[in-house]
Amino acid sequence: MPDPNEPACVNLREMLNRIGDKWSVLVIATLGEGPQRFGELKRAIDGISQRMLTQTLRQLERDGIVSRSVYPTIPPRVDYALTPLGMSSLRAIQSLAEWAVEHGEDVAAARARYDALHLDTVSAFSPRATRR
């Protein structure tokens, strides 16, 4: 097993943390359709707050996955787009999305089987469990 402190493992962990983030995946997938303005992204990504979208875009820009272009108009126009590096991540993200769609029911069935067998354990960790 490789040393988890090796640079390659550290890089892998950092990239999985970024790309594996729920909002990052949705931003990348949405920008895969083409450049968009902030408001367009916010409307396209259900449930994301303005603060979370801003934070996600900044992190993806810092990582070189998203570019931000500001145009000197009134009001200023800002477009976000995938960089070539970001475009290279699309295939992996699309494959993961296809897998999730194809196997979503299988995962739901496995969870139901597990929950039925471990009812006492699952209910203790359920968000609906009452806390005393």
Image (cartoon, rainbow, N blue to C red):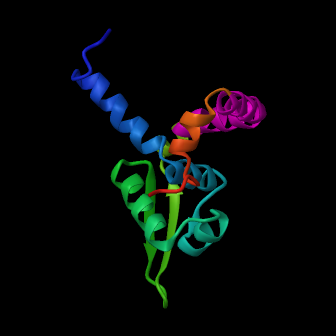
**Residue placed most toward the observer, 87 or 14:** 14
Q: Residue 7 at what x, y percent from top left?
A: 24, 25
Q: Is residue 132 above or below residue 85?
A: below
**Residue placed most toward the observer, 27 or 79:** 27
Residue ranking furthest to the top? 1
- Taking the image as shown, residue 27 lies to the left or right of residue 61, namely right
Q: Residue 109 at what x, y percent from top left?
A: 75, 31
What is the quadrant of residue 10 in the picture?
top left
Task: State the residue at coordinates (58%, 43%).
Answer: 123
Magenta includes 115?
Answer: yes
Q: Is residue 95 above or below residue 63?
A: above
Main SS category, magenta section: helix
Q: Residue 116 at what x, y percent from top left?
A: 70, 31
- Taking the image as shown, residue 95 lies to the left or right of residue 132, namely right
- Taking the image as shown, residue 75 lies to the left or right of residue 58, namely right
Give the total number of marks visible in the rendering: 0
Residues shaded magenta: 89-116
- Quarter of the picture containing the C terminus is bottom left
Magenta includes 101?
Answer: yes
**Residue placed most toward the observer, 19 or 64:** 19
Residue ranking furthest to the bottom? 74
- Quarter of the picture containing the N terminus is top left
Q: Residue 31 at what x, y percent from top left?
A: 59, 55
Task: State the residue at coordinates (42%, 36%).
Answer: 16
Q: Is residue 115 above or below residue 40?
A: above
Q: Is residue 119 above or below residue 64?
A: above
Task: State the residue at coordinates (62%, 55%).
Answer: 30
